[in-house]
Image (cartoon, helix red, strand yellow):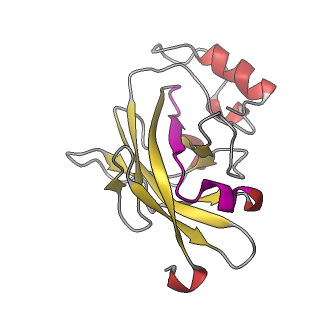
Amino acid sequence: MRLAPLALACLAALGCGEEASGPPIDDIPCWSGGGEPSDGEVEIGAGLDAFAPIEEGQDLELHLGTQGLAHFFVNARINGMATGEGGDSANLPYTFFGAYLEDGTAVDITECAARIAFSTPTDEGDALQGGRLLVVDGPYIEMIQGQRLRIMVEVLDRDGRYASDERVVIPVVISAADSP
């Protein structure tokens, strides 16, 4: 897992399952994932327009782009975590997606988490307001087709609560012409 030294120090100061006592979350300039589990939950899913659960070992469409990269449409939903309030991005949770070979090698180009709004609560949790692209680095596209790949999501909310989830999927290539 990629973790910048500054992010690691900031996360260590946040504590585990306690109220945040470290620096405000805005002081983390590039959070790249990692933390200790706390009182929240996140579930990784697929879907650009709506959350769709991903089952362990299922096929997941890998959309070939026109510029030498490819991407998965990923999504997430949370329970017991702050979704963010109003239009102030400082209140939005950091959400980090990643894709890894079985040996732990990262195959995506993600370096920093994004502050992304989650929807109004439902009985099943708060889904992202629109899915995200998990972009696969060009040299890995051919290598991962039909192979086991671990995709994951991590969320760090404004109160320092951290949760992660992952699934093993099998990438199935969809050509650029067939992509939405």
- Identify the residue at horizontal 52%, vertical 57% (top origin): 146
Q: Is residue 144 left or right of residue 163?
A: right
Relative vertical location of residue 21 with respect to residue 155 in this rendering, above or below? above
User: Dividing the image into 4 quarters, which one contains the N terminus?
Assistant: top right
Relative vertical location of residue 139 with respect to residue 25 in this rendering, above or below? below
On the question of residue 99 being in view, the answer is yes
- Identify the residue at horizontal 57%, vertical 78% (top origin): 175
User: Residue 9 in magenta?
Assistant: no
- Closer to the camera, 141 or 133? 141
- Identify the residue at horizontal 53%, vertical 25% (top origin): 160
Residue 98 in which image quadrant: top right
List the single residue furthest toward the bottom.
177
List the single residue furthest toward the left.
123
Where residue 157 sits in the image (x, y, percent)?
51, 34
Residue 47 in which image quadrant: bottom left
Q: Is residue 151 left or right of residue 8?
A: left
Q: Which residues are magenta?
A: 140-160
